[in-house]
Image: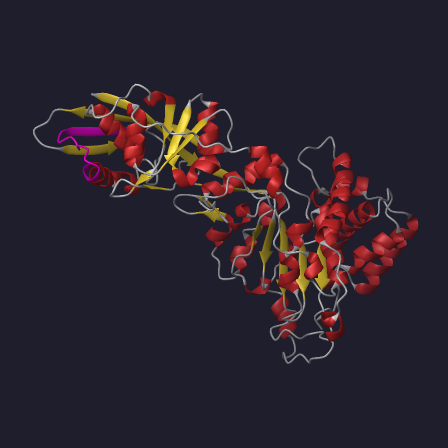
Amino acid sequence: MLVKTFGSAVYGIEAITITVEVNISGGSKPFYLIVGLPDNAVRESMQRVESALQTNALRMPRQKIIVNMAPADIRKEGSAYDLPIAIGILAGSGQIVGEDLDKYIIMGELSLDGGLQPIKGALPIAIQARKEGFKGLILPKQNAREAAIVSDLEVYGVENLCDVTGFLNGDLQLAPEVVNTREEFYNSLCNYDSDFSEVKGQENIKRALEIAAAGGHNVILIGPPGAGKTMLARRLPSILPPLSLHEALETTKIHSVAGKLAAADALVTVRPFRSPHHTISDVALVGGGGNPQPGEISLAHNGVLFLDELPEFKRSALEVMRQPLEERRVTISRAKFTVDYPSSFMLVASMNPCPCGYYNHPEKDCICPPGMVQKYLSKISGPLLDRIDLHVEVTPVNFNELASERLAEKSEFIRERVIKAREIQQERFGNRPDLHANAQMSPQMVRDLCKITEAGQNLLKRAMEKLGLSARAYDRILKVARTIADLAGSEEIKLEHLAEAIHFRSLDREGWAG
């Protein structure tokens, strides 16, 4: 008897419906075969299915069973096809009623006792199921809230195989999972654990991060150990504009595909903050592998990627980030398919000024030998540094500031100013939906939108000559000055805006490293 059930495969952040065809026919001895480009995890499913059926007093037919997974030219990976295969076998052997199988997408990994383990990519699977007109989705209970944010689709979270068979036979009533997406979204919006008001002193660094947030600029913090670089970077998401519902759904899809969503989470409602260790591999950073998965730069989509101790990262890992930084997406190509992952993030990096950490320190002496500082800084390539708009020197906080009882400005007040600046930019780029912030402007747009007065040109010329700023610093200064003007509500870029922008180009100065 031939029975069809329906599952789903995830490629990139999109899903493709897979038809699982189970044919049970007579034979002198049991014979099980899975075809349709299955990987090892799918081939092993027969052992898990057999054990789960026997444990739950169900019968595994001792006949010839052929399972075909169509379309047969798409590779099927992972253990999430256990449940649709098991249901197909039960329906084909007459142990359950198979009348409604064409109404549901069924996914789940089976334990040997029939329990269900969570799967990856439940959200894109639910979106595709609704798009193709399926009535509902049956999947493990841990993934139910994540899938239930898709409206007009009945999502049933089940704990074991018996729940599924009872439901399909009509012996068990299951209540569909219900999540009020907008309520979930707005209740948790901007719910951050840390706040800028907790940071003592460092007003100039907070100002730099406010500018970075307002214009979407990448930033590098340079300072000695213990100066507060990591603490400040971790609070940056709290001053970024809140996620829109569209951004929240897109971010949730990526985290769903990577299996990073907790069972209690339905939606990612705060901007992600990812901080990979400097030993990370190229593939883990940008994504890939035999079965391509999102990397850290995609998990940081719509949020912040923080690279602590930037010169300690492998040069190859940093170089592969250059293209995604420009294109705001990463393409992973294989012989038979290509997947795209979005990766629009703000890069925040931190580093010591030298190997010992105390070059330019106000109180401690640097013990690095001559030339070592320049050698240390040269670990960061020019093309990568070219994509970082603000270079900020961080100095240690003195005791009086640390002991002060004065409360610093809260993140919510800084965020309000950032949102106003972003609204000005949205209006400016109204005819370009792909542009959201000043940092994304092309060189031609910089010439058109960042015009400065003759006095400003003279100031910029003197600064470049006196400080030895490189040519690549010119566009960066104009972009940052445009953002500073937006924060001030000014239509034109004034001299004070330019002067502040020039201040944030430390690493471009000749002789900065001795």
Q: Which residues are magenta?
A: 54-69
Residue found farthest to the top: 99
Q: Is residue 119 left or right of residue 316?
A: left
* Residue at x-position 18% and y-position 38%: 54
Q: Is residue 395 above or below residue 330?
A: below
Considering depth in this image, is 82 or 221 the residue closer to the camera? 82
Q: Is residue 294 magenta?
A: no
Q: Quadrant of the N terminus?
A: top left
Q: Is residue 35 left or right of residue 445?
A: left
Q: Is residue 56 magenta?
A: yes
Residue found farthest to the left: 28
Query: Residue 155, position in %: x, y?
Result: 43, 30
Residue found farthest to the right: 455
Q: Is residue 93 left or right of residue 258?
A: left
Considering depth in this image, is 257 or 377 the residue closer to the camera? 257
- Residue 382 visible (yes or no): no
Query: Residue 81, position in %: x, y?
Result: 32, 35
Q: Is residue 55 left or right of residue 407?
A: left
Considering depth in this image, is 302 or 71 the residue closer to the camera? 302
Give the total number of marks visible in the rendering. 0
- Residue 429 visible (yes or no): yes
Where is residue 408, by image quadrant?
bottom right
